Image (tube, rainbow, N blue to C red):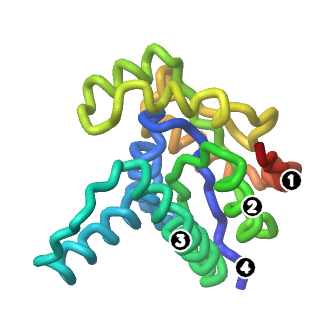
Amino acid sequence: MERGLIIFLNGTSSSGKTSIAVELKNQGEIPFHHLSVDQFFQNYDQFIDTTYPDMKPTRELEANVMSDILFGPIGSLYYATIKLFSELGLNVIVDTVISNDKWFNDFYDVLADYPIMFVGVHCSKEELTRREQSRGDRAIGLAHSQFDYIYSYDEYDLEVNTEELSSAECAEKILSYMKSSQEYSAFKKLSRREIRVS
């Protein structure tokens, strides 16, 4: 049995990754499992709220302190789950934002030897701002802060622009690429990133 294909949708917050993932999952011709890092954090929050309903912290923490504490362990579980699904022969859509070298290296260390279709999901900064404002559940400027790092890669197996194409059209392009039997080589050309300590 072959390992399942991992479709890594690389794009900033609000670039349209989740909408494409939903279209891929719903098309029915090729089975996919959509793994979103947001779901892992939401499930963790639900676990804490359900298991410890009477918890009353005696200190307040900034949101970034909480995410710094939790993202590494939850991210590791997320990457391990992607690996597990692939080992089970299941096709996986990866829906996350990898916006620094440490997160990239964590992903790379677990999944570099797996079949990965590296898809660039593009959108202009102006459209990202408009989407953030209309969504209401994202900090304005979040996508801008991720933009340069997220789109620093020179090569993808496939690129889609969510301003020019609908989510369904982007999904169709991905499916067509899969059916063409072209190699998935872009991610394999990447290597671990050097993390400088200042």
Visible residue check, residue 31: no
> Which residue is under mark 3?
73
Q: Say which label, 1 or 3, has the lower sequence index.
A: 3
Q: Residue furthest left?
A: 54
> Which residue is under mark 1?
191
The quadrant of the image that shows the C terminus is top right
- Under tag 2, what secondary structure? helix
Q: Residue at x 69, y 54 (%)?
A: 102
> Which residue is under mark 2?
108
Mark 3 neighbour class, 10 Å CA radius: few under 14, some 14 to 19, many 20 or more: few
Q: CA distance from mark 4 to mark 1?
A: 24 Å
User: Does residue 74 appear to the left or right of 100 in the view shown?
Assistant: left
Q: Nearer the viewer, mark 4 or mark 1?
A: 1
Q: Mark 1: which amino acid?
A: Ser
Q: CA distance from mark 4 to mark 2?
A: 20 Å
Quadrant housing residue 129: top left
Q: Position of residue 78 (x, y in %)?
A: 53, 69
Q: Residue at x 72, y 79 (%)?
A: 2
- Badges 1 and 2: C-beta atoms under 8 Å apart? yes
Q: Nearer the viewer, mark 2 or mark 3?
A: 3
Quadrant housing residue 110: bottom right
Whether residue 17 is situated above or below residue 56 in the rendered picture = above
The quadrant of the image that shows the N terminus is bottom right
- Badges 4 and 1: C-beta atoms under 8 Å apart? no
Q: Position of residue 139 (x, y in %)?
A: 34, 33
Of residue 62 and residue 53, the one placed in the foreground of this image is 62
Q: Residue at x 38, y 63 (%)?
A: 41
Of residue 193 and residue 39, the one placed in the foreground of this image is 193
Q: Residue furthest front?
A: 58
Q: How many marks?
A: 4
- Under tag 1, what secondary structure? loop
